[in-house]
Structures are given as structure tokens and as C-alpha cells.
Amino acid sequence: MNIEKYPSKLLENAVNEFAKLPGIGRKSALRLVLHLLRQDAGEVNAFANSLIRLRSEIKHCKVCHNISDTEICQICSNPARNNSAICVVENIRDVMSVENTHQFNGLYHVLGGIISPMDGIGPSDLEINSLVERIEKEDIIELILALSTTMEGDTTNFYIYRKLKGKDIKITTLARGVSIGDELEYTDEITLGRSLVNRVAYESSLGK
């Protein structure tokens, strides 16, 4: 087993930290750190400060749980948005994916994950109760279930559907232009946009 030797403990520590990032191996981490060393000190300080401020100042919207610079995010506070439709997504990256399609002008609700017993994630670990509260308090006409077409995503869809069954709300889901087993963030914008436009009633997707 080769153990990399570094000429500086400071360099090694920096490489170790970068290597903790997803998709970054030690060689890539070393390349990034050496790149930073070649930059002007002001640029490196700006880079470091942006990360510090991100971690210390970022907020989660009190309404939809998207990340925001303010207590209420720009989408929820935008009067031009259709506040009668909510698109339910797994995470913040999915909000960005849907927004990039330019096919949806409603609001969002970020669950913070999907039901996955194998990973120890149950309904109580997600923002499902707050979603139900929004449905009860706000004048919502349509709820779009835009979760990944995986077994876990379908399980979460069905759980939400059962929680809201009997309430006066239209529940729809993405058309199956999104292939079975796909995660939303990896679906191209055109396919995702078409799946939004051609969304179907959730009950029909159950095959009943």
C-alpha cells in the first residue's frame, strides 16, 4: 500500500479536507490545493470566506425548506408565482432542475430526502407533516409529486398520497418520460420539462 508523502503538513491537511468532498479523490484534491497555492492571496481568501459565509449564514425557507439568503425564499415570496400549485421534490438540487426547465411557475416543497428503510429514513425524518400543514392552511389546488422514479421515490409518493387522500386537492405525478429508476437531478431538462407538462393524475399511475 502506497502512502503518499507530502513536503508540508499544511499541504497534507488541506488535501485531506478536499478529499472528503464527494467525487474528489486524493489526486484531484492535491491538484486543487496546488491550484489554490498558485493563486493570489486575495482570491484564496475570497474563496475561503465564501465557504465560511455559506455555512454560517445560509438559511432554509420556513415555508418550502429550500435554501435561501432570507427567512422566506425568493420563490415563495414572489407574487408572480402560482401559489395554488406545489411541486414536491426530494432535495434542493431537484428544485434547481425543475426551475431550469422553465415549465413550472408554482411553489415547491423540499422533503429533505425520501423514505428509505434500508438507510433508516422514515416519514418522520422528512418534511411530510409540514407539507400536510401547508395543504390544510393554504389554498392549494394541485400537488405535483416530482420524486425520483425509484422504489424509494414511489414509496414516498404513495405515502404522501395516502396522507392526503380525501382532501380536496388534485394530486399529479410526472409523466413517465422520466425513466424508471432515474433520479430527477440527472434527467435532462427537455425530458423533465415534458414530463412536467404532460403530468398525469397520481391515481392513474397506480394502475387501478
Image (cartoon, rainbow, N blue to C red):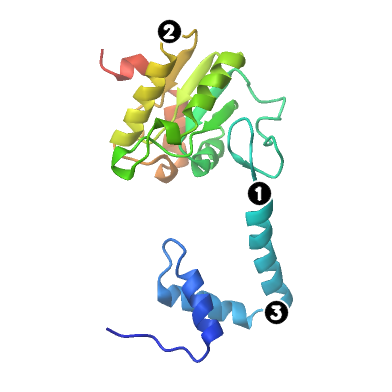
Could you tell me if the residues under marks 3 and 1 are in contact, i.e. CB atoms within 8 Å? no
Could you tell me if the residues under marks 2 and 1 are in contact, i.e. CB atoms within 8 Å? no
Per the image, label 2 sits on a secondary structure element best described as loop
Query: Is 18 or 38 nearer to us in this picture?
Result: 18
User: Within 10 Å of the Cα at label 2, are there few (<14), some (14-19), or many (20+) other Cα atoms?
Assistant: few
- Residue 85: mark: none
Residue 95, image x, y percentages: 53, 38
- Residue 166: mark: 2
Q: Is residue 179 visible?
A: no
Residue at 47% in and 9% down: 167
Residue marked by disc 1: 58
Could you say which quadrant of the image residue 45 lies in? Answer: bottom right
The amino acid marked with disc number 3 is: Asp
Label 2, label 1: how many angstroms apart (C-alpha)?
A: 37 Å
Residue at 42% in and 89% down: 5
- Mark 2 or mark 3: whose residue is earlier in sequence: 3
The amino acid marked with disc number 2 is: Gly
Label 2, label 3: how many angstroms apart (C-alpha)?
A: 61 Å
Report the side of 150 relative to 83 (left or right).
left
Please, is residue 161 above or below residue 25 in the view?
above
Residue marked by disc 3: 40
Residue at 49% in and 7% down: 168
Please, is residue 179 above or below residue 87 in the view?
below
Residue at 31% in and 85% down: 2
Could you tell me if the residues under marks 2 and 3 are in contact, i.e. CB atoms within 8 Å? no
User: Within 10 Å of the Cα at label 3, are there few (<14), some (14-19), or many (20+) other Cα atoms?
Assistant: few
The amino acid marked with disc number 1 is: Ile
Residue 127, image x, y percentages: 50, 32
